[in-house]
Image (cartoon, grey):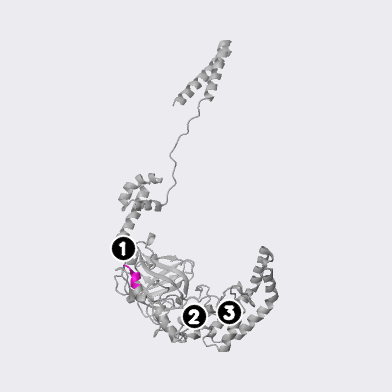
């Protein structure tokens, strides 16, 4: 204020001096002229030396904050209703360096808080139900059972579901609701018909409620894409578009400490994929290549390596260019032996051509396969024969044991005539110790997640319709964990399109 008054006074003095100087010049009064000029100059000099004004401090304009920030603050301060939120949030927001909310935002977020509170109040966590693959003895897993994992769904007149881009989705499970035990199920859950669960390879999902009626498997869409690349597909470079089918049974679990209940019921279950070498004592035939299926897998891997020769040599040239002579010998070997390797692969392909993959190999053929694989083995510190052509190729079977295990898996989940080829001790072990997807992990409906993960965030008060773990016997070796969620309101209204999916890597 003082600076402003001084500025006004000096400006008036300057103007007065200028006026006196003009008057003196006009009437010929030298005193007025000189005096006016002096006053104006002094006033101007003083004006320039006034201190600069202090900057005006204004409260910064804060950018809008996401709704979730206010909702998190509301939860932290126990603002459990829209009315309490509206009354208190604008006293809390400035302390958190957040903009205060206007009436529209207060009402909108208050309604959201009230809706979440209603959802929490009406939600009752149902006890879990373990979903267990049935024992195979006496069961045709390709046809039997009214509830199953994988395979083809029975959709009746319902079209096969598709993703947003129009691609058909992969079928994961069909659960007959009549099969579920009366185990404090959500009262909103229908008790007739089936639920069918679908997912896309990367994104997209659907859950369908199929009314009860007589029907058979739905025809596979012609455009259904393959599931994924796999070393278990013999002469196929990708898996088929359908997972292996396996009927299931249901085991009710307590709401608390379900892991202990599962440990009591399935504590000796090893889960996961069986290992052919583990049967060396009870089924010694599996300790070496046994069926032509194993030989066909090895030769298929060789054929992929032959197809990859141009890329293999190009990559070797790049390594020499990047690292100098360190890789020069490898490049020279590949160039010099390309023709010989091609002849080697063609001879192997001719050897297995026309073989029935599920017939036993003669002893001399087993020995020949072991010798053949020895030429491409890439064991540490050993690069025999044609190993360099195989080392960087697609679809490698790194050990002959890998091919034997792949054959074992196909038998374990195959049609009855294929399953019958397994030695009896292997069948017994599969039924006794390999019905879970992995040790201490199981498929499940309802309850809390079976891996101990808390239900938090968006699905804290949703029903877990189905949880599926990676399961090698179904061909789900790298699927991770998929969970399907639905709210109580959507379950009561049958809004199956509202089901959400979460995917978790393992």
| Quarter location, residue 260 | bottom left
Main SS class of the magenta portion in the image: helix
Between residues 247 and 164, which one lies in front from this camera angle?
Answer: 247
Q: Position of residue 171 (x, y in %)?
A: 44, 73
Identify the mark at residue 300; answer none if there is no mark.
3
The quarter of the picture where the N terminus appears is: top left
Residue that carries the numbered disc 2 in the rendered image: 277
Q: Residues in magenta?
A: 256-262
Label 2 or label 3, whichever lies nearer to me, is 2
Using the rendered image of the protein, determine whether residue 212 is visible from the camera's viewpoint: yes
Q: What is the crowding at mark 1: few (fewer than 14 residues within 10 Å), some, or many (at least 20)? A: some
**Which residue matches tag 1?**
123
Lateral position of residue 337 relative to residue 141, left or right? right
Image quadrant assignment for residue 140: bottom left
First in sequence, mark 2 or 1: give its number.
1
Q: Is residue 283 magenta?
A: no
* Closer to the camera in the image, 419 or 184: 419
Report whether 210 appears left or right of 200: left
* Residue depicted at x 56% and y 83%: 295
Decide which of tag 2 and tag 3 comes sooner along the chain.
2
Q: Do we see residue 233 in this rendering? A: no
The secondary element bearing badge 3 is classed as helix
Instruction: Give the percent coordinates (x, y) of residue 223.
Output: 51, 74
Q: What element does badge 2 sit on?
A: helix
For residue 346, the mark is none
**In the image shown, does 241 or 352 lie closer to the viewer?**
352
Disc 2 from disc 3: Cα separation? 23 Å
């Amino acid at each position: 204020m003082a600076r402003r008054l001084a500025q006004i006074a000096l400006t008036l003095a300057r103007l007065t001096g200028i006026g006196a100087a003009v008057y003196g010049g006009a009437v010929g009064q030298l005193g007025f002229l000189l005096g006016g000029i002096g006053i104006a100059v002094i006033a101007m000099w003083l004006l320039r030396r006034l201190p600069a004004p202090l900057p005006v401090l204004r409260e910064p304009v804060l950018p809008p904050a996401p709704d979730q920030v206010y909702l998190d603050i509301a939860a932290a301060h126990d603002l459990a209703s829209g009315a309490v939120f509206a009354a208190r949030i604008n006293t809390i927001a400035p302390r958190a360096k957040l903009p205060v909310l206007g009436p529209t935002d207060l009402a909108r977020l208050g309604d959201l808080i009230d809706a979440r509170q209603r959802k929490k109040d009406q939600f009752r966590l149902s006890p879990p139900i373990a979903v267990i693959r049935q024992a195979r003895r006496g069961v045709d897993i390709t046809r039997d059972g009214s509830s199953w994992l994988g395979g083809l769904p029975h959709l009746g007149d319902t079209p096969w579901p598709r993703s947003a881009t129009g691609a058909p989705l992969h079928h994961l499970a069909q659960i007959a609701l009549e099969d579920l035990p009366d185990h404090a199920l959500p009262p909103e859950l229908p008790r007739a018909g089936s639920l069918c669960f679908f997912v896309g390879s990367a994104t997209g999902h659907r859950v369908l409620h199929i009314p009860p009626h007589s029907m058979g498997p739905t025809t596979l869409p012609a455009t259904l894409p393959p599931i994924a690349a796999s070393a278990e597909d013999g002469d196929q470079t990708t898996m088929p578009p359908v997972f292996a089918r396996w009927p299931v049974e249901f085991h009710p679990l307590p709401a608390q400490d379900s892991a202990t209940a599962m440990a009591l019921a399935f504590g000796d279950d090893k889960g996961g994929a069986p290992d052919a070498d583990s049967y060396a004592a009870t089924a010694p035939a599996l300790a070496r290549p046994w069926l032509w299926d194993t030989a066909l897998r090895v030769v298929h891997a060789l054929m992929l390596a032959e197809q990859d020769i141009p890329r293999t040599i190009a990559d070797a040239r790049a390594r020499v260019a990047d690292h100098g002579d360190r890789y020069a010998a490898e490049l020279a070997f590949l160039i010099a032996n390309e023709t010989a390797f091609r002849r080697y692969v063609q001879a192997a392909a001719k050897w297995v051509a026309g073989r029935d993959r599920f017939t036993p190999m003669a002893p001399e053929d087993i020995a020949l396969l072991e010798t053949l694989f020895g030429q491409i083995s890439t064991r540490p510190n050993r690069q025999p024969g044609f190993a360099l052509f195989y080392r960087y190729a697609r679809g490698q079977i790194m050990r002959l044991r890998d091919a034997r295990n792949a054959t074992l898996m196909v038998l374990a989940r195959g049609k009855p005539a294929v399953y019958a080829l397994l030695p009896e001790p292997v069948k017994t072990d599969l039924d006794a110790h390999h019905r879970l997807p992995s040790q201490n992990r199981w498929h499940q409906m309802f309850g809390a997640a079976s891996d101990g993960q808390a239900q938090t965030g968006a699905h804290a008060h949703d029903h877990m319709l189905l949880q599926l773990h990676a399961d090698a016997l179904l061909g789900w070796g790298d699927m991770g964990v998929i969970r399907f969620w639905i709210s109580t309101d959507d379950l009561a209204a049958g809004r199956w399109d509202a089901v959400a999916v979460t995917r978790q890597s393992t």
